[in-house]
Image (cartoon, rainbow, N blue to C red):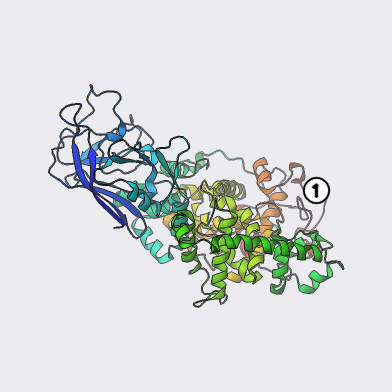
Amino acid sequence: VVYEQDGVFIHSSCGKNDDQDSLIAGILRVIEKENEVVVDWRPLDETLDTSNILCAGKDSSSVVEWTQTPKEKCSRGADRPSSYEAEWDMVTTVSFKKKPHSNGDATAHANGESKWSFLFSLTDLKSIKQNKKGMGWSYLVFCLKDDVKLPALHFHRGDSKLLIKCLEKHVALDESPDHERVLLVKTQKSLSQSFENLLDEPSYGLLQKLKRDPYTVTMGRFSKVTNYIFDSFRLSDPSNQRRPPSEMADLIHDTIPGLKINQQEEPGFEVITRIDLGKQPEVSRREPVSAEEWAKNMDSEGRILDVDYIKRSIFKGGLCHTLRKEAWKFLLGYFPWNSSKEERANLQKRKTDEYFRMKLQWKSVSEEQEKRNSRLRDYRSLIEKDVNRTDRTNKFYEGEDNPGLILLHDILMTYCMYDFDLGYVQGMSDLLSPVLYVMENEVDAFWCFVSYMDQMHQNFEEQMQGMKTQLIQLSTLLRLLDSGFCSYLESQDSGYLYFCFRWLLIRFKREFSFQDILRLWEVMWTELPCQNFHLLLCCAILESEKQQIMDKHYDFNDILKHINELSMKIDVEYILCKAEAISMQMMNCKELPQAVSEILGIESSSVTPDSDTGEDESGAELSCPTSLYQSISTPVIAANGTQDSTQQMSETQNLTPA
């Protein structure tokens, strides 16, 4: 219990006369639990005659459900004045569930255990309305998600300021620009906590929970990230867990508005125009770019002579580790590709000054100042917690009082000064860790991280527009690649590809080994062979697992378990080959849909291959880095011949990296 106050009354406005209030005294508490913080109000007198209490009825996208003492529920009197405010309504336990197809009226049921108490999680809180200053007792009205209002709480002993201060330690409250009496909850902190739940759930614990209540756990994890509440999942009957695909699609659509989901009960009813992608070509990879090869491609002033060649070479083979410290600065945009050695030295000097000015901003904040800056305090708390568990098995970060951990902390704190609106969100430490490991320099690592976050920013924003867009795009690409597999996933309530969420959020950081991530990221940063190559990597992984998923008839739980267990077991070179082959396959398609062309950044006039190339489809020139593509949108290999999906899967599974 982090806050407790007695003498907190509910004015039920249900006295015997219209001008008379029924006062219900109670105790208000704020309670920290393992994974959430709840606000709990309970009455002191549990022998109330509640037969005349007015009950709130709401017509919204959620249904208000409440319980009463064993008395008949009352209904709104026909003579109740129209000025009656909802904030005086008497509501007890509030929960959310999917609204049935009915007239929208709320329903109540008796439950002898309830004594006119209510509680809610702070993750459900939308806003707090305060009384006008100087107007009688201080009171607060809590408004939850879907605009459900709880009864006003009147503080007869003291005021509500201490409660507000307590809540600000757990949620960010800002005054509404439209109503000075309303405090709006900014969901940055709950978003950070949601990433913690999403990313750090041990696989064993997750699977144990899945066995008990798969929909609750899976959808709960996903819905938390987008700040939508499906509490009814936790209250559902375990004997009736299976939901029809249409309802599952509705729930996901509510979670991520704008995410298009196929709701077909029977996949066969869906009208699909099958597009022949042709045969998936074989692809090989080359050796990593060496320091000698890099040096040969620089002039006397330190300018790179052939940027396209270097990018193609990195895409096809990656970099030797000794070269990463320099090359990553170019790949991430910290160093301009056409800059000279002297220009880069001057840039580093300016950026060093800029970095330490920002670092000084948070270093010079006194304890007294920080007490009055809840956001900075929250950012620091989250960062300290995450830093202490980021890649601790890596020698660069292992042990106590490790200087790598100190640098990780300081860079993330300084980034909060650089972008205070975003600040710190769970998962960002995963993106910084490999960058700092390679740079071994605080300033260079910071500016490379800034460039990386410019690419990833939308993934961590409150609205999560980046994640919405990527999930839709991935679904589009996978449907073109294998519509049958998509239909199977939909038949198992998995068509929305929620299990790819972590892959996209932190760019496979938790799916590959640390050294493999270094290779994977540097390949993606070349931006070859097309836009959104990371989505093709997702397609490559899913297509590689398709055979097992379909042959063994995996259901919702099995698919989640199987994908989760792929972590640290994926061959990075094989997946890079397969993703590149998929990109060629799509680029060679003569009827590539416009939506796919836009996702991959291919000009529509460039997607049709030259049918007279006459090149052998295994193309010996593929092993030469200079001939990856003549241009980004013009593939070297033309597809000739088709095969069914089963044969294609069999052949692609036999691909082995060079």
Q: Quadrant of the C terminus?
A: bottom right
The answer to whether residue 654 shows anywhere in this view is no
Above or below: residue 33 compared with residue 586: below
Horizontal arrangement in the rendering, residue 445 relative to residue 255 (left or right)? right
Residue most extreme to the top: 79
Camera-nearest residue between 241 and 408: 408
Horizontal arrangement in the rendering, residue 321 relative to residue 568 (left or right)? right
Q: Residue at x 43, y 54 (%)?
A: 221
Q: Quadrant of the N terminus?
A: bottom left
Residue 104, given in percent of the width and then of the height, sits at 33, 31
Horizontal arrangement in the rendering, residue 174 relative to residue 638 (left or right)? left
Residue 307, given in percent of the width and then of the height, sits at 80, 60
Residue 327, given in percent of the width and then of the height, sits at 73, 66
Q: Residue at x 52, y 46 (%)?
A: 463
Q: Secondary structure at mark 1?
A: loop
Above or below: residue 248 compared with residue 342: above
Horizontal arrangement in the rendering, residue 448 relative to residue 149 (left or right)? right
Inspect the image, locate mark 1, and give the three-letter code of the amino acid beneath it: Asp
Residue most extreme to the right: 300
Q: Residue at x 87, y 68 (%)?
A: 300
Camera-nearest residue between 251 and 608: 251
Residue 347, given in percent of the width and then of the height, sits at 74, 61
Q: How many labels sit on residues?
A: 1
The answer to whether residue 158 shows anywhere in this view is yes
- Where does label 1 land, which residue? 610
Tag 1: Cα neighbours inside 10 Å, few (<14), some, or many (≥20)? some
Camera-nearest residue between 351 and 329: 351
| Quarter location, residue 578 | bottom right
